[in-house]
């Protein structure tokens, strides 16, 4: 189940709590929502990363794809993105995913758009 975070009174540049660390075990990923943006939060070897969840090719849901190491494969046409950088590792996608800043505090994962 995705966690919806509404940002009614918050500036877009603020860190927002999107999940607890326990909800995303190593090697797993989760879709969260910050305002109107779908974000994919991933645990790679105990470190958390966040990129856009909507494939830059034709909008496939990356959270329903396959995660291997630090690459997620889109379920629609199998583009690969590096979850640590947002870069395309395999097409047909050509544009990178947006990357979000992530920090962990007291067992919570906080995310904000890169400044
Ligand atoms: S929508 Fe993701 S590869 Fe086409």
Image (cartoon, rainbow, N blue to C red):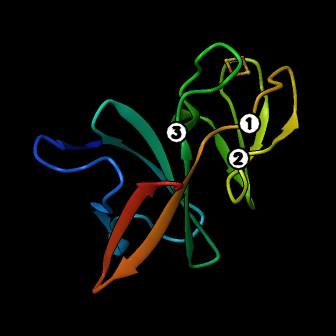
Horizontally, is 70 left or right of 5 in the view?
right
Quadrant of image for the N terminus: top left
Q: Residue at x 57, y 79 (%)?
A: 46
Residue closer to the observer: 110 or 74: 110
**For the residue labelled by badge 2, is the local secondary structure a helix, a strand or a loop?**
loop
> Which one is closest to the eye, mark 3 or mark 1?
1
**For the residue labelled by badge 1, is the local secondary structure a helix, a strand or a loop?**
loop
The circle on residue 86 is 2
Q: Are marks 3 and 2 in contact (CB under 8 Å)?
A: no
Name the spot of residue 53 as percent of width and height, x first.
52, 36
Crowd around label 3: few <14 · some 14–19 · many ≥20 (10 Å): many
Q: Residue at x 39, y 34 (%)?
A: 37
From mark 3 to mark 1, how far is it between C-alphas? 16 Å
Q: How many marks?
A: 3
Name the spot of residue 93 as percent of width and height, x first.
80, 23
From mark 2 to mark 1, how far is it between C-alphas? 5 Å
For the view shown, which residue lies furthest in the left direction? 9
The residue singled out by tag 3 in the image is: 63
Q: Are marks 3 and 1 in contact (CB under 8 Å)?
A: no
The residue singled out by tag 1 in the image is: 96
Q: Are marks 2 and 1 in contact (CB under 8 Å)?
A: yes
């Amino acid at each position: 189940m995705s966690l919806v975070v509404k940002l009614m009174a918050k500036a877009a540049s603020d860190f927002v709590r999107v999940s607890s660390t326990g909800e995303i075990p190593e090697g797993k990923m989760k879709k969260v929502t910050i305002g109107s943006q779908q974000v994919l939060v991933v645990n790679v070897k105990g470190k958390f990363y966040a990129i856009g969840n909507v494939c830059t090719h034709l909008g496939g849901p990356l959270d329903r794809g396959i995660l291997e190491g630090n690459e997620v494969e889109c379920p629609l046409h199998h583009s690969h993105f590096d979850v640590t950088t947002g870069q395309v590792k395999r097409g047909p996608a050509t544009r990178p995913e947006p990357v979000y800043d992530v920090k962990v505090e007291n067992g919570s994962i906080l995310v904000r758009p890169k400044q």
